[in-house]
Image (cartoon, helix red, strand yellow):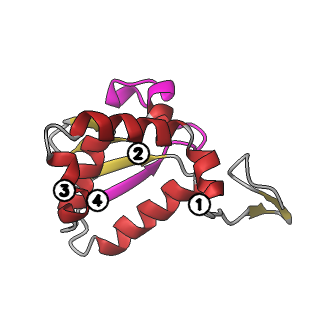
Amino acid sequence: MSTAALTLYYDGRCAFCSTEMARLGRWDKKHQLAFTDIAQPGFDPAHLGASMVELNLEMYSQAADGTVYAGIDSMLAAYTLVGRGYLVAPLRVPFLRPPLAYLYRMFARNRYRMSTLLGYKITPVCQDGVCAHRNPYLKD
């Protein structure tokens, strides 16, 4: 188990998601975050009390005390820990939370398409001279 204050579970096949995790990692000067790619072979979400279907619908995270967060609550926790809580401040406003959570879920469920539309790309994974994109929607 990680000693980080928060472990984020993200889809490494999603170009937007990978870019955001890298950005959070750069901002994490106190090393409070850990990142786990749920697309890696053998990943088992059982310790989160969630299924792979659920993890593919929205981002999950787990605090060091075992608390599990999903969706916008994961974002709130991560951005706050790296000192960038102001970027997600609207997620704290009670009357904005439901519509923003809905929009987040719609984005998360369409993240491959949205990554492509927003111009995000993933570098192909190469092994033994054979390269493959991790994102099924990105082609050479």
Q: Do the residues labelled 2 and 3 touch (CB within 8 Å)?
A: no
Badge 2 is on which residue?
9
Q: Which of marks 1 and 4 is in front?
A: 1
Horizontal and vertical percent position of residue 23: 40, 69
Within-10-Å neighbours for mark 4: few <14, some 14–19, many 20+: many
Query: Mark 2 vs mark 4: which is more N-terminal?
Result: 2
Horizontal and vertical percent position of residue 42: 56, 37
Total residue callouts: 4
Q: Is residue 50 inside the magenta stretch?
A: yes
Query: Mark 2 vs mark 3: which is more N-terminal?
Result: 2
The type of residue carrying mark 1 is Leu
The type of residue carrying mark 2 is Tyr
The type of residue carrying mark 4 is Leu
Badge 1 is on which residue?
118
Q: Decide if residue 81 is on the left or right side of residue 51.
A: left
Horizontal and vertical percent position of residue 12: 55, 52
Q: Over which residues does the magenta segment extend?
A: 34-54
Query: Mark 1 vs mark 4: which is more N-terminal?
Result: 4
Residue 89 is tagged as 3
Q: What element carries label 2?
A: strand
CA separation in Å, label 1 and label 3: 23 Å
CA separation in Å, label 1 and label 4: 26 Å
